[in-house]
Amino acid sequence: MRCRKCGEPAAINMRHHKLALCSRHFPEWFVEQTARTIHKYKMFPPDAKILVAVSGGKDSLALWDVLMKLGYRADGLYIDLGIEGKGESPFTYSAQSKEKAVAFADARPEAKLIIVDIPALYGASIINVAHKRRRGNRPCSICGTVKRHEMNRVALEGGYDVLATGHNLDDEAATLFGNVLHWQSGYLQRQSPVLPADGTGLARKVKPFCRFYERETAAYALIENIDYIYDECPFATGATSLSHKETLSRMEHKSPGTKMHFYTNFLRAKAEGLFAPPDDAPRDLHPCAKCGQPTVAPDLCNFCRLWEPVEPSESR
Amino acid sequence: MRCRKCGEPAAINMRHHKLALCSRHFPEWFVEQTARTIHKYKMFPPDAKILVAVSGGKDSLALWDVLMKLGYRADGLYIDLGIEGKGESPFTYSAQSKEKAVAFADARPEAKLIIVDIPALYGASIINVAHKRRRGNRPCSICGTVKRHEMNRVALEGGYDVLATGHNLDDEAATLFGNVLHWQSGYLQRQSPVLPADGTGLARKVKPFCRFYERETAAYALIENIDYIYDECPFATGATSLSHKETLSRMEHKSPGTKMHFYTNFLRAKAEGLFAPPDDAPRDLHPCAKCGQPTVAPDLCNFCRLWEPVEPSESR
């Protein structure tokens, strides 16, 4: 395989695009494509102040890198959840992933990294909280609640116009696949590369890598010498989303472009009016009594309730 | 495994229903469930005159059997397409499948079987037509056109209230899966166990087995000694729908009930208004100049055009 632009040996062959590129032209293409996606979905204007959620993984670090290359004002946000490896593994997942995010920022004078230390700020790691709430083996929903809350808090407090996450096509296709298998109407009606700010205290969210396959973001990180954490979160093992990714990858292997068509045809059908508009009945959102973020819960939001004493009914 | 009703050894274990039944109680349950499905989706009233499309396979013969057991006036329709086995196989697929349908009807005095002989009626088998139209390796779309047309014709000419087909849950889930992978809005908005007559000459169509897994219809046919054709149509090899069935079966194996939930949650979400109403812009349907069935084509319908001389532009 030869690079379509220069004829040198190709570094990557993208069968769904019928495009092979070398290690010089692939990163160029990758950055251009990101700009096109930002433009196509009207994600943010050139002068936007962007907060990039970085996990230490390839997608989020590559996203931060590309946004800076495109000249955007983009700061990083790392949320230290206090996740340690399971079993006998000596590594601590959060410490290692934080190290990668810090090293990335240190190597780039213009990169400002904000670090939120959950155990230090709230008095417990999400593992402690999961144990307290009897969810030791599956802290993922707590992790989601904590990350969403803190990303939103920092975006609003820091005056950011938009919060960008590194979700790639494999992530989005797997999420869509799960939503479709269960026909979760609300999720299907709302899944989008852009979630607008809603005026009640939820920041605008965008996914500029939603049209890149995971192997493309990995190739970019590799070629650009971005050092990232390879391991999956130790709690991800056996997660349904991984099983959906496996199923989709098997189909992709048989028929290249399956994931891309599945996701982009969904966006097209949605834009063309396939779905009835989401139920906009007032959801009775009001500010959480403690943190002020919008919630449908009667008093404290899901996040703030995590740190309250455990009710007897919760000790299952 | 023991039968839940009598404690005898079970003939089938339906994990998605958490129900095991013996060879006496399973057929009872199967017939009752069919009645429930007919009622649930308001398929037809007790005195309806039903035309059952029978292929000689397990699903359609079992359906005919069950409808007669439930006391419905149900006649069978067999369409002889003139399909021969591929390669060295000596059997002829159409002849064998017709034999099964005829034997089934012969063994039941109340069963009236209508046979439509395509080569005799129209002067060519669908294989001849496919060759003439340069689609020798993939006559499936022609087969679909012919079957739809003839089922509709016989239903209307015979004064039947409804046309019933043996599509099972595996069929419906695979069709839905394909529609979802490509986000084909019209198909998604219209896929249903009941397609109403549309007043322009399309018969009402129903799928009373849409909630049965294929292995359940097979078990019913086996226990009830219904002799059917085991082989798939020789042209089905490599069909996309088979590949979708494989994918779904792999997921079902990991998580029993996957197909059932995928399909029934789709019907529920649809009934609850997930989709915008299908585009009812007048499709400019008018009667075919030859057969009178509704078509959007300017002169002859797709079916009638099959038997016309080949235009030079079609010789690809």
Image (cartoon, coloured by chain):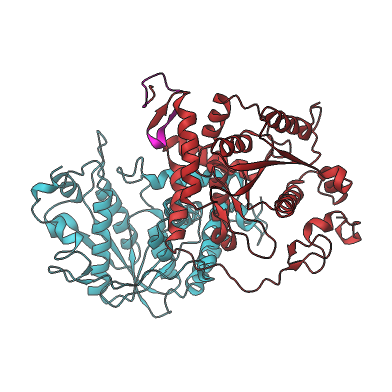
Chain colours: A cyan, B red
Q: Quadrant of residue A89?
A: top left
Q: Is residue A6 above or below residue A91?
A: below
From the viewer's perspective, is A24 left or right of A178? right
User: Could you tell me residue B84's position as x and y percent?
Assistant: 80, 35
Residue sitting nearer the eye, B192 or B178: B192
Q: Judge whether residue B304 is colored magenta.
A: no
User: Could you tell me residue A238's position as x and y percent?
Assistant: 36, 40
The majority secondary structure of the magenta stretch comes to loop
User: Could you tell me residue B43's position as x and y percent?
Assistant: 54, 51
From the viewer's perspective, is A206 left or right of B49? left
Q: Quadrant of residue A289?
A: bottom left
Chain part drawn in magenta: B4-18
Quadrant occupied by the C terminus of chain A: top left
Residue sitting nearer the eye, A189 or B113: B113
From the viewer's perspective, is A211 left or right of A240? right
* Residue A174 visible in the picture: no
Q: Judge whether residue B10 is colored magenta.
A: yes
Residue sitting nearer the eye, B219 or A175: B219
Query: Residue at point 51% right, 65% down?
Result: A267
Query: Residue at point 27% right, 68% down?
Result: A152
Q: Is residue A280 above or below residue B187?
A: below
